[in-house]
Image (cartoon, rainbow, N blue to C red):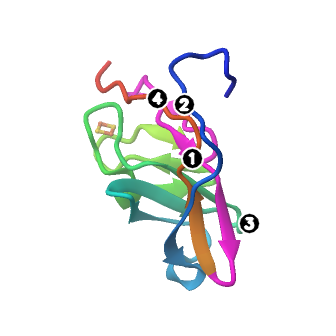
Amino acid sequence: MSERDGALSEAGPRWQPVAGEADLAPGGVMVVGAEGRSFALGRTAEGQWGAIDNVCTHDGGTLGEGELDDRCVECPRHGARFDLFSGQVKALPAVYPVNAYPVRVRDGIVEIDLGVGTRELEIGG
Ligand code: FES
């Protein structure tokens, strides 16, 4: 993300606790919330954490209720896939990306950085 893109706003990191490390086994994805927003939090089989918006841009499916396959979150409704670390679409029928958020684990608490620049989601396609 760069300052040249006027659609983005960045004001520094804003880490928010969303789960305990033990709440999600490797290879899984779950719904978490912070600041009134909802996220799909994933943990790869190798133990890497990532988070994306909890809304599928195809037709509003709940991504955190889907499945994690390698590093992609699969929407439970029609199977669109989103990269857990970039939010990019990896499989149709979704065509628009979601936002991705940095994740860290401190003292057993999983935190998401909500200070990153985000884009308003486009739904449809
Ligand atoms: S709502 Fe997610 S693939 Fe259709």
- Residue under numbered circle 1: 115
Q: Which residue range is magenta in the image?
A: 83-108
- Residue under numbered circle 3: 46
- Residue under numbered circle 2: 9
Label 3 within 8 A of ligand 1 by Cβ: no
**Magenta segment, principal secondary structure?**
loop
- Residue under numbered circle 4: 119
Q: Earlier in the sequence, mark 3 or mark 2?
A: 2
Q: Nearer the viewer, mark 2 or mark 4?
A: 2
Q: Residues within 10 Å of mark 4 (few under 14, many from 20)?
A: few
Residue 58's spot in the image, x, y percent?
A: 32, 31
Q: Nearer the viewer, residue 34 or 39?
A: 34
Q: Earlier in the sequence, mark 4 or mark 3?
A: 3
Which residue shows up at 50% across the image and 20% down it? 7
**Real-space CA distance between mark 3 and mark 2, rounded to the nearest whole angstrom:** 32 Å
Which residue shows up at 41% across the image and 65% down it? 32
**Real-space CA distance between mark 2 and mark 1, rounded to the nearest whole angstrom:** 9 Å
